[in-house]
Image (cartoon, grey):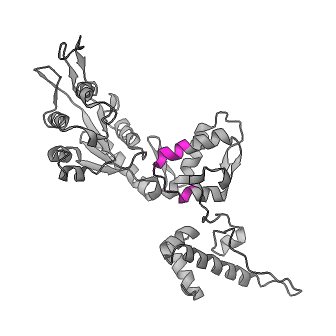
Amino acid sequence: MSGIHGFGGMIGQSSQMLELFDLISCVAEEGDSTVLIQGESGTGKELIARAIHENSPRKSSNFVPVNCAAIPDDLLESELFGYVKGAFTGAQQSKIGRVQFADGGTLFLDEIGDMKPTLQAKLLRVLQEREVEQVGGVRATKVDVRVIAATHQHLEGLVSEGRFREDLYYRLAVIPLNAPALRERQDDIALLVERFVDRFSRRKTDKKTTFDALAMQSLNNYAWPGNVRELENLMQRMVILHRGKRISMKELPEKYRCDDCFIVESSKVLSEAGVTIASGDIVPPEIEWSTDGLDFNGLISEFEDKLILMALSKAGGNKKEAARLLNLKRTTLIEKIKKKNLEV
């Protein structure tokens, strides 16, 4: 499909993703500056970090991910910086940390906002001095590592609350990137649905699982608090439960159903008239057949009027939202309203 682009396992045709792909390419080429990726959970922040690494001069060295929220505070320090033999009970031999393991490559610190202040200070030293000191050690070791951090939290807010070091924040945010929420990139939902359905179809010879127009419109209108990860999980469930079938809205789990959604399926005639939706609760103009034939253009225009007025009603008079429901450009909708002298 034209307009579809991919980068590091991510796909998209929305303006947000195309802009992000350009930024990733630019950042990856540079190879050294720290990067801070912010975005909600499930938006693919680690995919972004991996794409930066795999397209950088550091790609031949290690990409080392660390989830700062998943490792207990008392273990995170030794995991990051390593330790020398005898540093604490159970340290029977020395062990390098993940910072050293990433030497020459990339260290990805996920959920950096959960890191405790004492570790923030040690991380700041790594960034400033390009060296790391193991727990219990007395000698620092030089490291060449690119740090990419990510968080779903608002770090500037944490700084103002005194929960995150201001100097570390500015060291991390040399290049800030934003991972857009799925609800902000609705143009990509159909692409992602197809990608995930293909991924979870075990036998390529099986008939493909598909979604009818109303089911797809329901998915487009859902808020996706879990973002791409939530969509991926739902597609896995749908493929397993309805393999090779055409899924309607009634097959979707209840929370994904949108009773007020429009059915996005238009005939060639309606499409040529500029109408791209139909709704089960919109009654077409009453047709009276006669020997003189139909007023075809008049009937189409009347039906189009009903669609526009219903969309405006459902959108509370908001033309931008009505245009989205109708899958029209806002300027196109406004032009039609003026031309038809519709009262809104």
Residue 227 within the segment the image draws in magenta: yes
Tally the numbered discs: 0
- The quarter holding residue 74 reads top left
Give the residue displayed 31% in from the left and 40% down from the top: 111
Give 130 or 216, whichever is nearer the viewer. 216
Decide if residue 103 is in sight here: no
Q: Which residues are magenta?
A: 219-233
Picture coordinates of residue 75, whole percent (x, y)? 26, 26
Say which residue appears at 17% left-offset and 17% top-offset: 87
Q: Where residue 246 sits: x, y (%)?
A: 70, 49
Residue positioned 68% across, 67% down in the render: 266
Quadrant location, the C terminus:
bottom right
96 left or right, relative to 190: left
Depth check, front residue: 258 or 304? 258
Residue found at the very far right of the displayed protein: 291
Residue shown at 13% from the left, 34% from the top: 129
Q: Quick one: which residue is furthest to the top in this view?
A: 92
- For this view, does 78 lie left or right of residue 213? left
